[in-house]
C-alpha cells in the first residue's frame, strides 16, 4: 500500500500544500526549521491519527488559524482525512472515503514505520517510550490489539480513581472486584499479542542485525512482563490491592511492562557500544517493516527523519540498499545523502 498524494491545509507552516508521490523515494531536503519534519509528521498522523512530536495534534494548527486538515490518497484510491478545529468548537474528525470513522477504525489503513534520531536512544530510554513503540506498531497491524488497549486504558483510569476513593473512605474495597476482572480480561489480550510480536520478530531481528554488523552476533528482544502467568492475573491484582490503595495507582499490568535489547545473551544497555546501539535500532526499524508485511501482506511506508546524520557510512549504505523496493520518505540537510542513487528518487526542496 503506497500513498499517491497528500494535501495539507493550515498544518504547521503549510497553509495550502499538495504533493504527488511520483517515485519510490521522496527526498525532502533543505535547511533546518524549514518544515521538512512537518511533512513526515503529517504522513505519520495519517497512519496512526497522532503526532510523534505533540501530545495533541490540534497543536499543529497553523498560527492564527482555527482548523487544519490532512488528506491522503492511497494507491488503491482510499481517501483518508484528519480534521481538527478549535473554533467555533473543538472538534476532531477522521474520515475514510468521506465517511466519518472512529479513530480505531482509521488506524491501520495506511501503514508506516518511523525512524528519527531520537530512536537511537530507545535502548536506554524510559520504559514508557518502549511501550509506546509497541503500541504504535501493534495497533497498526491488529484492530483487536488497539481496541483492547484503549479499553484497558479506560478501565485503568477508573480503577485508579476508585483506589483513591477507597483510600479516602468514600468507596468500599469490594467495589474493585468488578474493575479487577475487566482489567485482567483486556490486559490478558494485550499481553498475548505482545508475546506473539516478540516471538514473530525474533528471526527478522537476528537476520537484520547480522547483515548490518557483518558478524554472527545474535540480537533479541526480551519481554519484561509484570504478569507472567495470565491465569493468575486477577489473583495478582488482589494480592497487590493493599499496596495499590495506599499508592492510588495500579502496580501490575501491561501499562507497566517493558522490554530490553539482548546481544549475545547480555543486555546492550549495560555493556553495548554506541555502534551496537545504532546497529540494533536500525535492525529493529527494518524488522518492523518485515513484521508489518508478514502480518498484513502490505509494505508500510518508511519515514526517515534526518537519521543519516546519526549513521556512519556503512550503516547508511545498508539502509539505502534496504529501501530499494520500499516507498520511503527521507528528510535531510545533506545534498549528497543518496550519492548517485537518484534514478528512483523524487526530490522536494523545502
Image: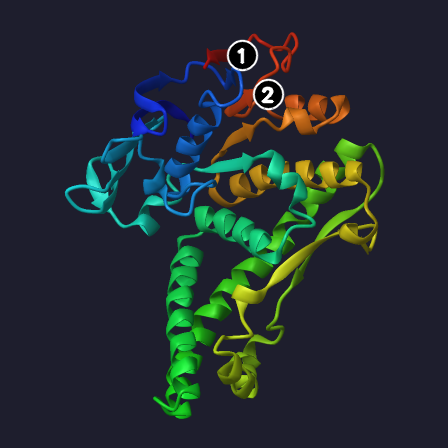
Picture residue at 44% right of the left edge, 57% below the top: 145
Which secondary structure, mark 2? Answer: loop
For this rendering, which residue is in front, 116 or 340? 116
Picture residue at 65% right of the left edge, 25% below the top: 308
Picture residue at 57% right of the left edge, 66% below the top: 256
Q: Which residue is mark 1?
A: 344
Vertical placement of residue 292 versus 124, above or below: above
For this rendering, which residue is in front, 191 or 33? 33
- Placement of the N terminus among the 4 image quadrants: top left
- Placement of the C terminus among the 4 image quadrants: top left
Q: Which residue is mark 2?
A: 324
User: Quadrant of the rendered structure where residue 186 is?
Assistant: bottom left
Percent x, y of residue 164: 42, 81
How many labels sit on residues?
2
Percent x, y of residue 274: 78, 39
How far, Cα to Cα, is label 2 from label 1?
A: 9 Å
Percent x, y of residue 142: 44, 52
Which secondary structure, mark 1? Answer: loop
Vertical placement of residue 95 versus 32, above or below: below
Task: Please give left or right for residue 245 compared with residue 11 in the image.
Answer: right
Sort mark 1 into few (<14), some (14-19) or many (20+) by Cα contacts within 10 Å: few
Percent x, y of residue 117: 62, 34
Residues marked 2 and 1 touching at CB (< 8 Å): yes
Vertical placement of residue 215 versus 227, above or below: above
User: Quadrant of the rendered structure where residue 118 is?
Assistant: top right
Vertical placement of residue 315 versus 96, above or below: above
Q: Report the residue that reaches farthest toward the front.
A: 64
Picture residue at 68% right of the left edge, 49% below the top: 202
Q: Which label number is shown at residue 15?
A: none
Amino acid at each position: 500500500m503506497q500513498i499517491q498524494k497528500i494535501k495539507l491545509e493550515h498544518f504547521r507552516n503549510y497553509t495550502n500544500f499538495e504533493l504527488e508521490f511520483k517515485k519510490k523515494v521522496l527526498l525532502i531536503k533543505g535547511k533546518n526549521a524549514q518544515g521538512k519534519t512537518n511533512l513526515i509528521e503529517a504522513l505519520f498522523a495519517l497512519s496512526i491519527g497522532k503526532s510523534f512530536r505533540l501530545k495533541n495534534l490540534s497543536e499543529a494548527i497553523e498560527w492564527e488559524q482555527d482548523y487544519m486538515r490532512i488528506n491522503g490518497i492511497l494507491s488503491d484510491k482510499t481517501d483518508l482525512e484528519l480534521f481538527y478545529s478549535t473554533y467555533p468548537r473543538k472538534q476532531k474528525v477522521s474520515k475514510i472515503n468521506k465517511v466519518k470513522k472512529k479513530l480505531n477504525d482509521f488506524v491501520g489503513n495506511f501503514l508506516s514505520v518511523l525512524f528519527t534520531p531520537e530512536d537511537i536512544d530507545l535502548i536506554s530510554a524510559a520504559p514508557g517510550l518502549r511501550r509506546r513503540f509497541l503500541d504504535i506498531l501493534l495497533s497498526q497491524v491488529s484492530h483487536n490489539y488497539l481496541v483492547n488497549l484503549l479499553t484497558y486504558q479506560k478501565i485503568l483510569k477508573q480503577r485508579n480513581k476508585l483506589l483513591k476513593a477507597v483510600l479516602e473512605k468514600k468507596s468500599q474495597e469490594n467495589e474493585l472486584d468488578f474493575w479487577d476482572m475487566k482489567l485482567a480480561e483486556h490486559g490478558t489480550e494485550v499481553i498475548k499479542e505482545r508475546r506473539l510480536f516478540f516471538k514473530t520478530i525474533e528471526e527478522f531481528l537476528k537476520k537484520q542485525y547480522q547483515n548490518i554488523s557483518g558478524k554472527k552476533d545474535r540480537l533479541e528482544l526480551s519481554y519484561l512482563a509484570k504478569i507472567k502467568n495470565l491465569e493468575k492475573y486477577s489473583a495478582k491484582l488482589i494480592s497487590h490491592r493493599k499496596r495499590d490503595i495506599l499508592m492510588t495507582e495500579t502496580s501490575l499490568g501491561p501499562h507497566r511492562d517493558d522490554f530490553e535489547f539482548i546481544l549475545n545473551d547480555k543486555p546492550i544497555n549495560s555493556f553495548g557500544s554506541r555502534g551496537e546501539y545504532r546497529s540494533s535500532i536500525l535492525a529493529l526499524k527494518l524488522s518492523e517493516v518485515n513484521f508489518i508485511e508478514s502480518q498484513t501482506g502490505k509494505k508500510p511506508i518508511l519515514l526517515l527523519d534526518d537519521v543519516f546524520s546519526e549513521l556512519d557510512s556503512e550503516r547508511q549504505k545498508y539502509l539505502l540498499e534496504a529501501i530499494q523496493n520500499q516507498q520511503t520518505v527521507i528528510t535531510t540537510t545533506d545534498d549528497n545523502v543518496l550519492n548517485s542513487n537518484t534514478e528512483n528518487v523524487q526530490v522536494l526542496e523545502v
